[in-house]
Amino acid sequence: MPGVTAGRECRRRVAPTRWCSRLAAPASFAALLLLVVHLLSALRSSSHTHWDADVAFSSDPGATAGAAGAAGGTNHLDILMRSLGKQRIRRQAASVPAGGTGSSSAGASSGRAASAPPPPLPPPPQSNQTLFVTFGNTAFFDFTHNWVLSVKRLGVAYVVGALDRAMSEKCAQHGFAVIDLWQQQPSNSSRRFLAHRRQLRGGLEDAEKASESGDASDFFRANFSTFRSMGATKVQFTLSLLEADNGFGTVVVSDSDVAWMRDPTDHFAQHPSADWFISTDCLSHEVEVAWQPGHNQPRCGHIPGNIWGRAYNTGKRACFAVRNRPAARRLLELWRDMLLAPEHSVVVEGTNTTFGITDQLALNMLLEEGSEWKLDADPEDRHTTLLRNGTLRLHPLPVLLFPGGHVAFVQRLPWKHGVEPYVVHATFQRYSTGLSRYGKRGRFRQFGMWLLDGPEYFSPPGARYLTYQNNVRQYIHNLTAARFGGVLPLLHKHIIAMSFQLAQFRDALAVSKMLNRTLVLPKSWCWCDYDWTPHIVEKCKIRGSDLRLPFECPADFVFHIPAMDLNEHTNTTYRVPGFLEDPRAPPELSLSRAELRVADRAARRAALAGGGGGGSLVLAAPGAAAGVLYLGSVQHDVLAVAAPLEATAVVELTHMRPGLIRGFDRLEDSLQFDQLYKNITEEMYWCCAAEGGFERAAFWYELPWPFGEIHTHGHSPWEPPGMARPEWCDSADLSPGEKEWTSYANHPCQFLANATAAAIASQLS
C-alpha cells in the first residue's frame, strides 16, 4: 500500500516501543477556523460576479423527466424535472429572432431545436414538500446507491446530481432520479461563469478518463480548482431547485456518505422560523442539552452567547436543509459567488501560507459575517440563531439526532440515550482520503447502515463462520491489579489492550483459515480515542466530547479494515462485528452454534494426567463447550478438536487469549500466513501525541511473533508490551506545543519518569 513502506522492519518484537518515520499529520482544521475569524475583514469583497440568472441546470428534459417519474416516487419530482427543462427551452426560444433565422450560443451548444414550445405543465402542487438531494461521481457510486436506498425507505422525493457521464448512466440503469450536472450549457452573459464552466468541463473530462482507468477514487478533491468549481455547481443546483417553485418548500442536501434513518421533516416543523438547518461538528450532547452561553467548549460555538468554536458542517461534510425563502436563497447566491471568485483565499498572518477557499470554508465565512463577536437567539425560537446581522435564521441540528461519525460510531450517543437518529454522516475517519471509503463502508456495515449487502454477503452458499470472545477488559483489569499494583497509565493500558486484541485476531484468523471458515470479528474495546490533534494525549479523548473510557470502539480502531478489504485473501472471508445479530443474517446462524473453549497448558497437563486421551486434544469440555483448544496448539490440533463441528454454522472460541496458535503444520503455510497478517496490519498505531513526523506523534502497537520465527525459536507465552521513555523527551528542539503535550501526566515522557504522573494518568476515565 502507498505510504506504508517506510519503517516496516521496525515492527518486529525487538524493542518495547515503535519509532518509525511517517508523513506529517495534517494540521487541525479547528485552528484554521479560529484564524478565519480574524481574517474576514480582508476577505470581504463587493465585486462578486453573480451567475446569469438565466442559467439553469437540467439535462435532456424528456429523458430526465422519465427517469424522475420512474424512480423519484412522486409526481412533484416529475414536475420539478420537467419545469427545469421547460425553463431552459423557453430561454433558447426567446434567444431566436423573429422568423427563426437567428442563432443563440445556448441553442448552438446544445444542438436542440428551439422552435417548438414545450407542452404546458400542470399547476404546481399546493403542498410544501421536502426534496432530498445528493451529488456523486462514478468512483463513489456505491455510496450514492446506498444513499438512494436509505432515502427510498423514507418514502420521500429525491434527486441525484451526477458529476460525470458514467455516473449518469449508472443512475439511469438503476432507475434513480438523476440530473446531469456535468453537461449543462449556460448562457454567455458572464465571462467569469464561462471560464468557470470551461475549467470545470476540463476537470470532468480528466475525471472521466481517470474513472475509466480506475484512478478516480477522489479526483475532485485532488484537483483544488476543479473541487471548488464543483462546489459552486452544487450550490447553484440547490438554488435552481428552489427557484423552480414546484411545491418543494425545503431542499435537504447531504453528502452521499450519509445514511438516512428517519424523515426529518417533523424536526424541521418544530422550528418554523428557521431559514436554514445545518449539522455541526459538536461532539457533546451534554453541552447542547445545557444550551448555555459562554460554555467555552470546542466545536459547539453555535449555541447563542458563544463567539468561539463554531463548526458548521458544510461542503465535504455537508448535511443541511434550506427553506425556500429570500434570505436562504440570498445566502446560496453569496456562497456560489464566493466560490467563483478566484481572488478569495485565506493567508496565514505572518507567513507565506495561503489556503484556497473550499465550499466548506466559504460558507463558514459567510455565516460568520456580521456575527463574529455576537451570536443571538431568534426571539421566536431559542434553538435558532440570528446570523448575518439578523437577516438569516439558522437552526443548528442537534448532534444526537443528526450525528457525525464520532458522535454516532465512536461515542454511540444516540443509542446510549435511547434515540434513533434521523441521519448518520460517516465523518471522523481515521484513514487517509484514498482509503477512507473502505473505512466508511466498514462502519456503515457494522451499524447495519450499508444497504447494498444482499444474500451474497449474508448467506453465501456453504458458508460457515468462526467468531471469538474478546476478553480484553477483564485482562486489563487483572493485569493492572496483579502486575502494576493498580497504577497503569491510561495510554499504556491502551497500547497493551490493542496489542492484546491484535494478537487474539492473529490466532483467530489462523484458526479460520485452518477450518476454512469466515471470521466474524468481535466487539473492540479501546482506552484512548484517536485524533490528529495532540491535545488528545492529555486524557485520551477529544476535548469537548462526552466519551467515557474505556469504550466500545469501531472495528477500524483495532483492525485495518481497508487493508482487509483490499486483500484478496481476506476481502470475502471476514465479517464486521454485529454480523451475526443483523436481521438480514439467516436464522440458522442463531440456531446452529457451538463453543470451543480455550484453556492454558496447566489445564492440558491436568487433563492428560487424569487419563484424558493419552495426548489427544479431543477432550470433553465442561459446560456447553463442545471441545477444548489449549494454548500453543498447531494446525492438526485444531482440525482434530473441530472435526465433530464440521456441519455447525457458527463456532465460537470462548475464553480467547493470545498464544492459542503457534503455527501451521507446514512451515511454508506458516510463512504464507505471516505475510498475509503483515499485509493487513501494516499501520497499526495510536495517534497523535505531537504534530509533524510520526516519530514523536505515533505509538505503535506490538504485534505477536510470526509463526515462522516460532518454528525456528520455539513458542513462548504472549507477554504484554512495555514502554520505554522516548529519547527525545528532554530534547532542546521541542516546539512550544511539544513542551505542552509532553507535560501531560498521560504522556510517556511524564509517567515513565514520574510516579505521581503515573498515578494521575492511571485514574483517567
Image: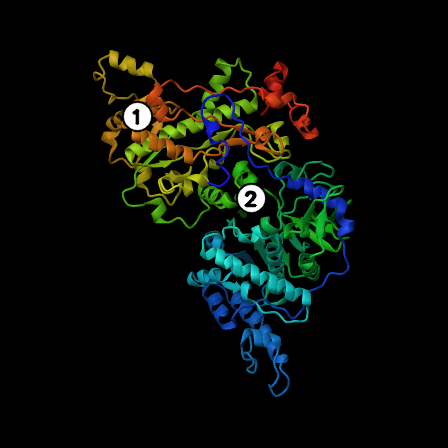
Query: Where does residue 302 sit, x and y in percent of width and height?
Result: 69, 44
Query: Where does residue 445 sit, x and y in percent of width and height?
Result: 44, 43
> Dot 1, crowdedness within 10 Å: few (<14), some or many (≥20)?
few
**Count of labels shown?**
2
Residue in the foreground of this view, choosing between 123 and 526:
526
Residue 123 falls in which quadrant of the image?
Answer: bottom right
Quick one: which residue is furthest to the top in this view?
Answer: 609
Query: Where does residue 87 sit, x and y in percent of width and height?
Result: 60, 73
Give the CA distance from mark 2 to mark 1. Answer: 42 Å
Q: Answer whether residue 99 is visible to the viewer in this image.
A: yes
Residue in the foreground of this view, choosing between 241 and 286:
241
Residue in the foreground of this view, choosing between 182 and 587:
182
Secondary structure state at the residue bearing disc 1 = loop
Depth check, mark 2 against mark 1: the one in front is 2
- Is residue 569 left or right of 239 when viewed as pictured? left
Quick one: which residue is furthest to the bottom in this view?
Answer: 99
Disc 1 residue type (three-letter): Ala
Mark linked to residue 427: 2
Residue position for label 1: 624
Query: Where does residue 104 sit, x and y in percent of width and height?
Result: 62, 78
> Dot 2, crowdedness within 10 Å: few (<14), some or many (≥20)?
many
Residue 536 falls in which quadrant of the image?
Answer: top right
Say whether disc 2 or disc 1 marks the residue closer to the N-terminus: 2
Q: Answer whether residue 381 is visible to the viewer in this image.
A: no
Secondary structure state at the residue bearing disc 2 = loop
Disc 2 residue type (three-letter): Thr
